[in-house]
Image: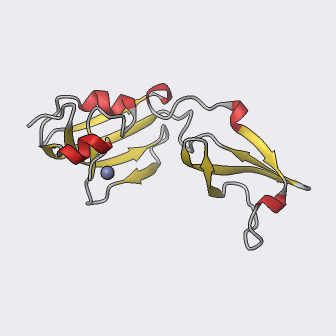
Amino acid sequence: MKAANGRVVSMEYTLTDGSGQVLDASNGEPMAYLHGFGNIVPGLEKALDGAEVGHKARVHVSADEAYGPKNPEAEFEVTPDKFPEDMTPQVGMQVAAEGPNGPIVLTVKEVKDGGVVLDANHPLAGMDLTFDVEIIDVRDATEEELAHGHAH
Ligand code: ZN
């Protein structure tokens, strides 16, 4: 069976950045996603369209086809009292927050006197990515999965 819209694709993957540093990997627990529903980055979904079980590929995805360019306007400053008392903001720290369209990750960019600069860009925004993938399984999605728009 080939990866196609409305099918659940399971794959092993290793994600690296431009310098070859591993950012994420499935590590023996294949990730299942619903093909054609934007559950994975557009460049990778496009590359896997029609791929069959056993298909192995190295897929280079530009930032525009991954998490998009970095938006400089997504940086903003808050006062330190916005952080819980038991949390000391440090550069590079990632904090979960509620965004307008659901949960988002904010990255601490700068800590200064009386202010903390946060970056609401996706941590991988602006980065060209490489995915080493192997298709493990392809099956038809259930009615429920199609209704939800994601794999179960
Ligand atoms: Zn669901």
Q: Residue at x 18, y 31 (%)?
A: 4
Q: Residue at x 61, y 40 (%)?
A: 121
Q: Residue at x 52, y 30 (%)?
A: 68
Horizontal side of residue 57 vs 126, given as left or right: left
Query: Which residue sits furthest left?
Result: 1
Horizontal side of residue 51 vs 123, given as left or right: left
Q: Is residue 70 above or below residue 105?
A: above
Q: Quadrant of residue 111?
A: bottom right
Q: Residue at x 17, y 35 (%)?
A: 3
Q: Is residue 109 above or below residue 90?
A: above
Q: Is residue 90 above or below residue 59?
A: below
| Residue 30 % position (x, y) | 25, 54
Q: Quadrant of residue 91?
A: bottom right
| Residue 16 % position (x, y) | 42, 44
Horizontal side of residue 144 vs 67, given as left or right: left
Return the residue nearer the eye: 138 or 29: 138
Please identify the quadrant where the N terminus is shown. top left
| Residue 146 % position (x, y) | 24, 40
| Residue 143 % position (x, y) | 19, 44
